[in-house]
Image (tube, rainbow, N blue to C red):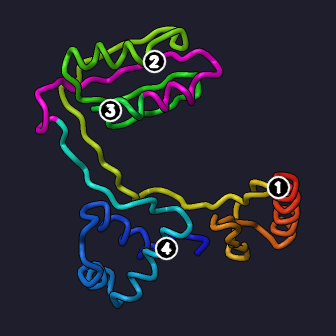
Amino acid sequence: MRELDETDLEILRLLVEDARRPYSEIAEAVELSPPTVSDRVDRLREVGVINRFTVDVDRSLMSSGASVLVDLHVRPGHIEEVRDSLSNLAGVEHVFRTADSHLVFKANLRERQLERGLADVVDEHVADYEVRLLTDSSWEPNPGGVEFALECDECGNTVTSEGVSERIDGELYQFCCTSCQARFEERYERFSESAT
């Protein structure tokens, strides 16, 4: 699978609406058989379009805290460290990284929990931060209007229908041509040998 067709996009849309939707119901909607839908979902997972199936929890119903949006201006070289700290902070729902060294996160936290959590994260690695109280938020992960394009793991070019997929040590890699695949595998083998 190198390109998503309208059927793939409709399958994605139906799964986004309800990830527990039975394949038989999806098959009826897209006019395919349930095994064909299952194969398509497997391929979408294989190439990384679908990462996992999860639950969208409304945290505001589970705690008495406030929803906040926090914008952290992180000093260069510390983005990953601070992002890992945020990911481990209870109540954090989404963490976004911007190109200008900011981490923005949405959380549902009690006042003291926010202060303690920020104290743990905001240290010498954070230059400045701003906390905003959210009055409403929505999440609409609609797959419509997107283009699907795999990148070659060797050269970065777009992988077309002539591309090659190869699983190396359990990880799936995409290549635009067999030459890129050969170069990548050769380099991978050299690195693996030097690591042992």
How packed mark 4 is, by other alpha carbons closer than 10 Å (few <14, some 14-19, many 20 or more), is few
Q: CA distance from mark 4 to mark 2?
A: 39 Å
Which residue is the site of mark 4? 5
**Callout 2, which amino acid?**
Leu
- At 45% from the left and 28% from the top, the residue drawn is 85
Vertical order, 8 against 86 (above or below): below
Vertical order, 70 against 8 (above or below): above
Viewer-side residue, 154 vs 31? 154
Q: Earlier in the sequence, mark 4 or mark 3?
A: 4
Which residue is the site of mark 2? 72
How packed mark 2 is, by other alpha carbons closer than 10 Å (few <14, some 14-19, many 20 or more), is many
How packed mark 1 is, by other alpha carbons closer than 10 Å (few <14, some 14-19, many 20 or more), is few
Which residue is the site of mark 1? 196
Which residue is the site of mark 3? 92
Question: Which residues lie in the magenta part?
Answer: 60-85
Q: Quadrant of residue 186?
A: bottom right
Mark in the foreground, 3 or 2: 3
Q: CA distance from mark 1 to mark 3?
A: 39 Å
Q: Secondary structure at mark 2?
A: strand
Q: Quadrant of residue 174?
A: bottom right
Q: CA distance from mark 2 to mark 1?
A: 40 Å
**Callout 4, which amino acid?**
Asp
